[in-house]
Amino acid sequence: MKRSHRVLPGFGLSLGITLLYLSILVLIPLSLLFWNAGGGGWEHFKSAAFSPRALASYKITFGASFVAATINLFAGMLIAWVLVRYRFPGRSFMDALVDLPFALPTAVGGIALTTAYAPNGFIGRQFAPDGIIGRHFGPEGLKLAYTPIGIVIALTFISLPFVVRTVQPVLGGLDAQLEEAASSLGANRFQTFRRVIFPYIWPALLTGWTLGFARALGEYGSVVFIAGNQPLKTEIVPLLIITRLEEYDYPGATALAVVMLTASFSLLLAINTLSRWTNRRASA
Amino acid sequence: MKTLVVTSPVPVSPTQSQATTRDAKRAATRATSEPRLLQWFLIALAVGTMGLILVVPLFVVFSEAFSKGLELYKASIVNAEAMSAIKLTLLVAFVAVPINTVFGVAAAWAITRFQFKGKGALITLIDLPFAVSPVISGLIFVLMFGRRGIFGPFLQAHDWKIIFALPGIILATLFVTFPFVARQLIAFMESQGAEEEEAAVTLGANGFQTFWRITLPNIKWALLTGIILCNARAMGEFGAVSVVSGHVRGQTNTIPLQVEILYNEYQYTASFAVASLLTFLGLITLGIKTALEWKTARQLKEGQT
């Protein structure tokens, strides 16, 4: 049923405030960014946005974000499943703790992870040449912090909540009768999961993955400490942007930002399409 | 007509019928759940995963912060530099959170109470800061107000400072935190509907009365959730603020930036001591948020029945 809500007052005022505020804070600054990027000409943009150092940083940023989001696809699915389906002591505490990466400032997460995973940290030590795990990796051991693995660790930490929080409501809304029907038709538990539950939740899984991936692409605070920040090896794009800014190379920083924003906006579009799909399932 | 009466050939004893219902129940559980052992295995795996990813950093913060004793912990926080960082962070939150609260209420009112073209685009625009890297959020303000920015020469001519000063920090914080209140309220007010407000207006209440007497009491818990989330982010924001602050000690350093500086100077204990303040803030925020979510969920359920 469609009906007009114009009975209520305040439409002009509230929409006016919203649009004015968003224009000043978001629209104008962002369009100036794109305008700035176009100002130096295409050649200039190309040399800044696609220099070998920039290309290496895209590779490490997109690659590490992809791996982290995929790790969280499995970890998040597991956590969401356990939280929705099982009852056990400490469940609500665990549920609340999932949001920790949202509540803990990224810099704090960054220094804490670095301390734990550095070669002398209490986890990193196990991966050192004489550590329990590290001795199986040859004379060098396995270095976690200050390598791409460290970047993946930090990105996994900050993007964990997304899959959990998108899958949880969809899984909770799944009609138990579907599973009963599958079972009475002779499916075992694994078949029910593969043929009934998984097809139902996978749009939510994909939405969560995309959200986590998008978040990881732009992440700065938790990564800079653990990354090692070597150009061409462990330098992420946000850090390269800051380096360019500190050199007062505004066009260089802008070019990188435009590439990253284009990626982010495409992902945002994908997320909106996906979540419309997910919501339809949750309400169906 | 013949009625069909199903009777069991032998009288069913009470224990037998109990046994069959128990069997049926067990069969239903088997159909929609996993064996106990597998359940406990999955629970253990999930708890282990969360422990490794989430609890490790939490544990490190506190064990490092208190590793050299309570005296050094106190000294790390009660000193001029840390105190000025705390004051600056409180000031920034004190300015940014109320502004974004007003914006959030206005945006939610417009979006959930009226139909208009471009609503979807507006909601996407409100979500935008979540998709933009914090570093880029800071960068856009440097490009406008920085020394070589668009308004740079104008600002320098008037000796006004935005970047590497308080206004820049506030602007960047406003940008990264404006979705929180709006998002929380849009979701809540959408599910609640406008019937009560429409009734109030029909009965002769003016807009202000309607908002103050009907809307605000209804949305207060959702609003509070949005505010504390906005506040936590405002106090903890690192990337965006780091770009615009200039890291001037004792002047433009917020708490997260102070944590970074101390860490980079190998003053680990002091760095983690200051970081523990933000960790407490994060944990308290999580606790309040969880409690408020229970409240709003109950409120929505009551409203539906």
Image (cartoon, grey):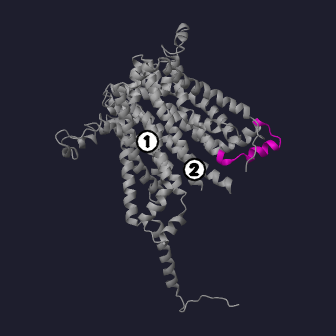
Q: Residue at x 67, y 41 (%)?
A: B112
Q: How far separated are the C-alphas under marks 1 and 2?
A: 21 Å
Q: Where is residue B72 in the image (x, y as percent from the top left)?
A: 35, 30
Query: Along the line of sight, which residue is nearer the eye, B31 or A90?
Result: B31
Q: Mark 1 points at which residue?
A: A159
Q: Which residue is drawn at 53% across and 88% down?
A: B12
Query: Along the line of sight, which residue is nearer the eye, A224 or B301?
Result: A224
From which residue to which does the magenta span run?
B190-207
Q: Position of residue B83 (x, y in %)?
A: 45, 25
Quadrant in which the C terminus of chain B is drawn:
bottom right
Question: Is A238 on the left or on the right of A2, as rendered?
Answer: left
Residue B301 quadrant:
bottom right
- The reply to whether residue B68 is in sight is yes
Q: Position of residue B268 (x, y in %)?
A: 33, 30
Q: Which amino acid does label 2 sit on?
A: Asn
Dots 1 and 2 on the same chain: yes
Q: Which residue lies furthest to the left in this view?
A: A139
Q: Mark 2 points at which residue?
A: A279
Classed neighbour count for the residue bearing mark 2: other residues with Cα under 10 Å, few (<14), some (14–19), many (≥20): some
Classed neighbour count for the residue bearing mark 1: other residues with Cα under 10 Å, few (<14), some (14–19), many (≥20): many
Q: Which residue is drawn at 45% across and 29% down?
A: A259
Q: In this view, does B14 lie above or below A270?
A: below
- Judging from the image, what secondary structure is the residue with disc 2 in? helix
